[in-house]
Amino acid sequence: MNYSRIFRVIGQTLEPLRPETYEMVCYGDCYLVRCRVKEEKKVRGLASFLRLWRQQENPNIRKNPKDGVSMHAEFLYSLEELNRQDEERKEPRRDPNAMPDPYSLSNTLRAVGEFLDRKPEAKLLFARNHGQEVVILYETKGGVRNLEEYPISTLYDLAVKKYVKRKK
């Protein structure tokens, strides 16, 4: 599996949770994903669920009571599980003529994966969203580590180009 496919499947799995932030770490053939979510019931229903916790509140920070309580969740995905999930999702997920949401988690993560797929022999070490940017740490075949940041708008452009290419 290439990174774009792996990350798309992870994104599709996590989209119903609407994570506020995420970070992804690669451990061999497994991907540990940490994210901040609001809906505990949906989290506990996922097979890859590992841990759920609340961060201690800082009394100096005022919160809007309408925002609800965010929780941190961890998920662990093996390549075998991701392959199985991808096979289960082979049917079209929406109208084939409709423009996909390029800002969706699955398309954002797919774009991160496409970025890594374009780097020869790149190995993901860490990826996370940081505000309106995505931070990617990867290692080259020669052992050189690179940290790169991309605005979400750049990933949006990649997603749109991918959509246009598929339609041709």
Image: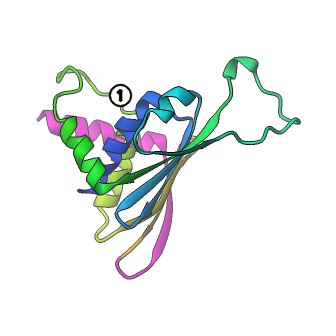
> Which residue appears at 42% of the width and 80% of the height?
143
Mark 1, residue position? 101
Q: Closest to the observer: 34 or 156?
A: 34
Q: Which of the 4 quarters of the picture holds residue 46? A: top left
Name the side, left or right, on which 96 lies relative to 12.
left
Residue at far top of view: 66
For label 1, count other residues whose C-alpha is less than 10 Å away and answer few (under 14), some (14-19) or many (20+). Answer: few
Q: Closest to the observer: 87 or 119?
A: 87
Q: How many marks?
A: 1
Quadrant where the C terminus sits is: top left
Quadrant where the N terminus sits is: bottom left
> Which residue appears at 17% of the width and 24% of the height?
96
Residue 155 coordinates in the image, percent (x, y): 40, 43
Specify how the rendered protein is coloured. rainbow
Residue 93 coordinates in the image, percent (x, y): 23, 26
> Which residue appears at 25% of the width and 57% of the height?
2
Name the side, left or right, on which 97 lies relative to 29.
left
Q: Is residue 10 visible?
A: yes
Q: Say what amino acid the circle numbered 1 marks.
A: Asp
Residue at far right of view: 60
Residues shaded magenta = 141-168
> Which residue appears at 48% of the width and 73% of the height?
145
Residue at far left of view: 168
Residue 81 coordinates in the image, percent (x, y): 29, 49
Q: Is residue 135 visible?
A: no
Q: Is residue 23 magenta?
A: no
Residue 133 coordinates in the image, percent (x, y): 53, 46
Name the side, left or right, on which 141 lies relative to 129.
left
SS assignment at label 1:
loop
Q: Is residue 115 above or below residue 57?
A: below
Q: Closest to the observer: 148 or 12?
A: 12
Q: Which of the 4 quarters of the picture holds residue 159? A: top left
